[in-house]
Image (tube, grey):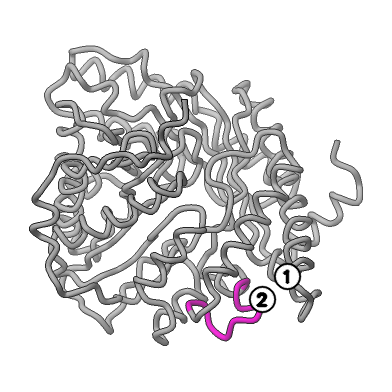
Amino acid sequence: MINTSEILETLRMIDSEKLDVRTITMGISLLDCATDDPAELSRRVYDKITKKAQHLVAVGEQIEREFGVPIVNKRISVTPIALITGAVPDPLPIARALDRAAQETGVNFIGGYSALVQKGMTRADRALIASLPEALSTTGRLCGSVNVASTRAGIDMDAVRLCGEAIVKAAQRSADQDALACAKLVVFANAVEDNPFMAGAFHGPGEGDAAINVGVSGPGVVKRALEQVKGAPFDVVAETIKKTAFRVTRVGQLVAQEASRRLDVPFGIVDLSLAPTPQVGDSVAHILEEMGLEVCGTHGSTAALALLNDAVKKGGVMASSHVGGLSGAFIPLSEDIGMIHAAECGALTLEKLEAMTCVCSVGLDMIAVPGDTPAETLSAIIADEAAIGMINNKTTAVRIIPVPGKGVGDSVEFGGLLGRAPIIPVKQFSSKAFIERGGRIPAPLSSLRN
């Protein structure tokens, strides 16, 4: 039960510390839509989504008004589309059907234009990856992802190469929008099936017919709590973050249960991820600096982030029996005002960000790089991040944006939650011969757990 003191505490966090429910995401299985008729498949996909999610936005707005909890986004995730397009020659009509369904239901984004290729690619997987540049540059609300690695399977380097090439083409196709299409594409290792956050959300094949997943965010709440224990030992810091994460997760639990009841869709998970925004007071980087770092990215940043990520998870699991998704701390460069400042002053580099991804929730997120970065360099960056995820048995990801016509020292303004990204340098030495080897990097010995 939610008691009166928790309600009052929640109101204070919402009012002064930027606590919000970042997203209510309805996951919808499309496995029963499969057919070999492209037009019929598109119709079935559109009809199922618009029927199942027809009240999602309205219910989200009702809960927002009645409980006074800001709900920033209402979203849909679907079965990885490559799983239902094996009998059709081209997945692009499905991409457009998904985008039309998102518009009809009024959601902000729809995720799941995705392929799971950690051990190999089917014809449908290859067709979907090849279609990503056009699909993401010609639709407004569609998001895509590719899972190229797992601890169990290793890294599919052929898929890694194709993803690097797809990112370059997506950047070129959306050059007039500063490569915005790339911001809607995530390349994963160990992707989870119940992630409510875009651009990587999809409704995994192990999920039921539908589910309500809620993502809660509260970097400002955590920073304010740490201001009260300035100079205290790290044991106290960790305990403070745990208690704060508990309270934040309870908000998500309440919203998820209400949305589930009103929509008559099973409650899936609460994802407690400290997802920052470009607004002042809503930064993960500022939490790390509150621990004593002069600037995020300096020595000690990885240790501080490890503490934060672990304490957030521990607090979350005490508040809900269904904590899932990614749950932890995100470090998207363009979406965090503290990260932006750290990159602009030189404290935060691509190499330091990569090190920090060993202990955070996801990986290299919303990283803008020079527009002339070769596809094989992007693929090599993906391979490095996938290796971190594979070896450490954790989810990692890359959302990287080569901005045409821009170089180091420039910046790109995406607006809204996507924020502003300074263009950061990549290594100028070639990885071409490495990527051209192809094949599969074998799974580590730790994968043999049976």
Q: Which residues are magenta?
A: 287-297
- Give how far apart the Cα atoms at labels 1 and 2 are: 9 Å
State if disc 2 and disc 1 touch (CB < 8 Å): yes
Q: Residue at x 23, y 40 (%)?
A: 156
Disc 1 on helix, strand or loop? helix
Q: Which residue is mark 1?
A: 234
Q: Is residue 129 one of those drawn in magenta?
A: no
User: In the image, 299: left or right of 344?
Assistant: right
8 w.r.t. 229: above or below: above
Residue 110, horizontal then vertical, whole percent: 40, 39
Q: Mainly helix, strand or loop, the magenta region?
A: loop
Residue at x 37%, y 13% (from the top left corner)? 32
- 317 left or right, relative to 40: right
- The amino acid beneath tag 2 is Met
At x 20%, y 42%, the residue is: 159
Q: What's the mark number on residue 291? A: 2
> Residue 438 location, x and y as percent?
13, 44
How many residues crowd mark 1 within 10 Å: few (<14), some (14–19), many (20+)? few
Tell me residue 174's x, y (percent): 19, 58
**Above or below — where is 182 with respect to 300?**
above
* Number of disc labels: 2
